[in-house]
Image: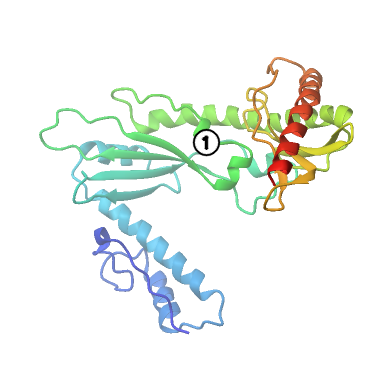
């Protein structure tokens, strides 16, 4: 029935969003925020969103102002070189036991719409990649600034197609600035994302090649082709084979897991194998040969898995 409380950290004591004193981007935003709080209506589903958006916009402006007041020539120079880029966020970070730092979140500009590149894309929001840059504030007695810490950040959904954690960032050279670093990074990411989209078709071709030996899959990820399940048999022993594909396929082979259709463990759950990654594989093979060699491996592994299931049944 009452509006929620919003609690900010101890570093943000000067952030007072509902006072007209200093920090709000504009008066209209203050009035809409104060109105949403003072005229709270729990039956109006838009009120909470209005409050959160208003607080966020004001907090971004507050942090930008804090960073602008930092007495550090490098930070001031970096800000001046990237002013034309839209959507940059800044934050001043400090603590009792750690030095002051300035953090930048820079949205990377690439000549592509990732959502439109994926057929049947399920994402509700436009996928973006940010470069997080952390500058230690230079102390007076330090002669030269240390290199900033760099990290790529993206929405979690993007991991289905492309993991920014797999990107090896170029080293930060002495005397380099952000405006010099970004173009090469953006060019590299564009190329790698195109490769990631092409890898979807490669995984799909491999699943289709498996179908020639294992029959139609029981289920498969139709969009990113990151997993598939087939029904297989060895004599009277019937089991399922789960395939899990990384975004690094075919450089990284699929992970397999076998699941019995006839054996249950003590918890009445179907018996499953451990994850399997050790089998004949070369990323240079054609997909047909990859599938053929893997199916040969499954023929032999089915005997071992059946024995494993029977032993689990005896223990039960």
Left of 93 or right of it: where is 142? Answer: left
Position of residue 159 in the picture relative to residue 180 (left or right): right
Q: Position of residue 137 (x, y in %)?
A: 22, 40
Asked if 263 appears above or below 1 in the picture, the reply is above
Q: Is residue 316 above or below residue 212?
A: below
Q: Residues within 10 Å of mark 1 (few under 14, many from 20)?
A: many
Looking at this rendering, what residue extends furthest in the left direction?
A: 141
Residue at position x 88%, y 28% from top? 212
Above or below, 264 against 238 in this view is below
Residue 226 lies in what quarter of the image?
A: top right
Q: Residue at x 41, y 83 (%)?
A: 38
Of 257 and 284, the residue lying toward us = 257
Q: Is residue 262 left or right of residue 179?
A: right
Query: Which residue corresponds to mark 1?
Result: 164
Tell me which colouring the rendered structure shows: rainbow
Q: Position of residue 74 (x, y in %)?
A: 25, 36
Q: Nearer the viewer, residue 283 or 130?
A: 283
Residue at coordinates 52% horizontally, 82% vertically from top-left?
A: 42
Report helix, strand or loop for mark 1: helix
- Does any portion of residue 155 appear in the rendered image? yes
State the image coordinates of residue 89 (x, y, percent, origin top left): 39, 49
Residue 256 placed where, x, y %?
70, 33
């Amino acid at each position: 029935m009452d509006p929620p409380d919003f609690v900010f950290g101890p570093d943000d004591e000067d952030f007072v969003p509902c006072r007209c004193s200093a920090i709000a981007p504009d008066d209209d935003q203050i009035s809409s925020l104060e109105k949403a709080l003072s005229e709270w209506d729990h039956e109006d589903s838009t009120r909470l969103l209005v409050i959160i958006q208003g607080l966020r916009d004001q907090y971004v402006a507050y942090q930008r102002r804090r960073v602008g007041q930092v007495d550090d020539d490098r930070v001031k120079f970096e800000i001046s070189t990237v002013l034309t880029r839209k959507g940059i966020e800044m934050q001043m970070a400090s603590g009792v036991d750690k030095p002051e730092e300035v953090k930048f979140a820079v949205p990377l500009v690439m000549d592509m719409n990732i959502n439109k590149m994926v057929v049947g894309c399920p994402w509700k929001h436009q996928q973006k990649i940010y470069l997080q840059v952390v500058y230690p504030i230079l102390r007076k007695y330090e002669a030269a600034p240390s290199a900033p810490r760099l990290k790529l950040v993206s929405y979690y959904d993007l991991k289905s197609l492309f993991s920014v954690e797999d990107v090896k960032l170029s080293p930060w050279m002495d005397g380099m600035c952000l405006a010099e670093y970004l173009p090469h990074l953006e060019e590299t990411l564009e190329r790698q994302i195109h490769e990631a989209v092409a890898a979807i078709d490669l995984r799909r071709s491999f699943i289709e090649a498996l179908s020639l030996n294992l029959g139609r899959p029981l289920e498969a990820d139709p969009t990113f082709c990151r997993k598939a399940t087939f029904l297989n048999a060895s004599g009277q022993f019937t089991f399922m084979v789960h395939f899990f594909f990384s975004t690094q396929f075919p450089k990284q082979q699929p992970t397999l897991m076998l699941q019995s259709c006839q054996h249950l463990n003590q918890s009445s759950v179907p018996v499953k194998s451990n994850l399997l990654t050790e089998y004949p594989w070369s990323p240079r093979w054609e997909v047909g040969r990859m599938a053929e060699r893997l199916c040969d491996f499954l023929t032999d592994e089915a005997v071992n898995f059946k024995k494993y299931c029977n032993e689990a049944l005896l223990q039960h």
